[in-house]
Amino acid sequence: MTRPLKFVELDETTTARLKDAVVNRSEHAFTFLERLVAEASTVGEESGAQLVVAGELSRLGLSVSRVDVPESIGDDPIAGVPQVSYEGRGDVLATTSSDHLTLLLNGHVDVVPADALGWTNAPWTPVRRDGWLFGRGAGDMKGGIAMATLAIDALREVLPAALTLPLGVLSVIEEECTGNGTLAALRHGVTADYVVVTEPTDLEMLVGGTGIVWVDVTVQGAGGHAEAADRLEHPLDAALRLVPVLEDLGRYVAKEHPEARFRDLSQPYNVNVGLVRAGDWRSSVASVVTLGVRFGHPTKWTSEQAIEEIKSVVVAAISNESGLRVTFSSTGFRAQGYLLDEDSPLIGAVGDAHAATHGSRPGTHVGGSTTDARFYLNQANVPALCYGPVARNIHGVDESVELSSIVKGAQTLAHFIAGLAFANELL
Ligand SMILES: [Zn+2]
């Protein structure tokens, strides 16, 4: 059940004091962020990063606990397909109160790999340059976690009573591949009246995203010696011919199944071949080729429906290739699309807090990707949106976050939390 949102803007003096406190504590938040970026927390390796987060939340006076992700999470109909065992891996929850939470701040510590060449500095060595902090995960989304802790740090200094508001911070794993970290916490009962996910949103409000499904397409042939390469079936050639076919599928779906709220995106439904695995020897014709495919699909579609679309274009494209076998396997994301009502009081209140702090209202937008906000909206009927710093090159080379936007976002968030506390007569 959604409880009415009670929020009031703070007076000018309190707003200014809070803004100053955020600035005063910002250097501490940046060093915390650097320690967090230095933890190479790719999927399966999140524990070090979670320790850093738990330490900071504990220093801020919150009560910190661990929320396990059960191995059985994969059986949940909403779960993604697990990638690695959950043994020794889990979420970190920090709360100001054992009461039902009014607000939950959600962030993920897992990051995508950084094996690509071309980084100016090593991806796990945080470096500050021209007001930006560089490193894998700096933008997506360790900067958002630092934004959340900075807001709490500032409140602790100038308005500690605001932290009697039942507030939680949930630091999850596996946002980048399944969403099972947030799902496990939700199934465990970790929820709130309202949720803000501090993903990088350029200080706007991200209110919706497409469905996302991952599927591996494997093309197999008999292989053979390279001296006969001109006479053999080539799974690699066939698989590479699938790449533009799959990309076309995204454009076709955008044309045939448009959704009003996603109309402004240049291409809402990208089908991306992000991974190619092939062959084992230069003098052998590759016998097995796997394409790792990600399909951002319309919000109303199920994962099964999206996989069927991929199967039908693939089978049509290589049916003429004699001697090749194609198989499909589901892995990782099976994410439903999501969309928060444009008239949600959460959009109003976060917008008010931003406007009171920075002078103008932030816009709302949707993305051709997913976030963990979907679980709160779809499974728990809890209003959730994303609001976070300005980031560049997320998932790419030289990923970075703008430090001043962490400060600005934390000022908004501190105002928002204090405004909730004030309206709930805690101040
Ligand atoms: Zn993210």
Image (cartoon, rainbow, N blue to C red):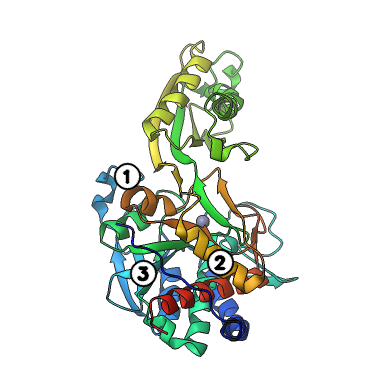
> Horizontal and vertical percent for residue 405?
64, 69
Q: Which amino acid is tagged 2?
A: Asp
Residue shown at the point (61%, 68%) measured from the top left? 355
Q: Name the residue under label 1.
A: 78
Task: State whether residue 427 is above or below residue 404.
Answer: below
Depicted 188 relative to depicted 8: above or below: above
* Image spot of residue 374 (x, y percent): 41, 50
Q: Which of marks 3 and 2 is in front?
A: 2
Considering only order in the chain, which callout, 2 or 3, is on the residue closer to the N terminus?
3
Under 8 Å from ligand 1: the CB of mark 1?
no
Q: Which amino acid does label 1 sit on?
A: Ile
Q: Name the residue under label 2.
A: 352
Using residue 366 as the reference point, say whether residue 46 is left or right of it: left
Mark 1 or mark 3, which is nearer to you? 3
Q: Are marks 1 and 3 in contact (CB under 8 Å)?
A: no
Q: Distance between the residues labelled 1 and 3?
A: 25 Å
Q: Is mark 2 on a helix, strand or loop?
A: helix
Disc 3: which residue: 102
Task: Compute the Cα span from label 3 to label 2.
Answer: 18 Å
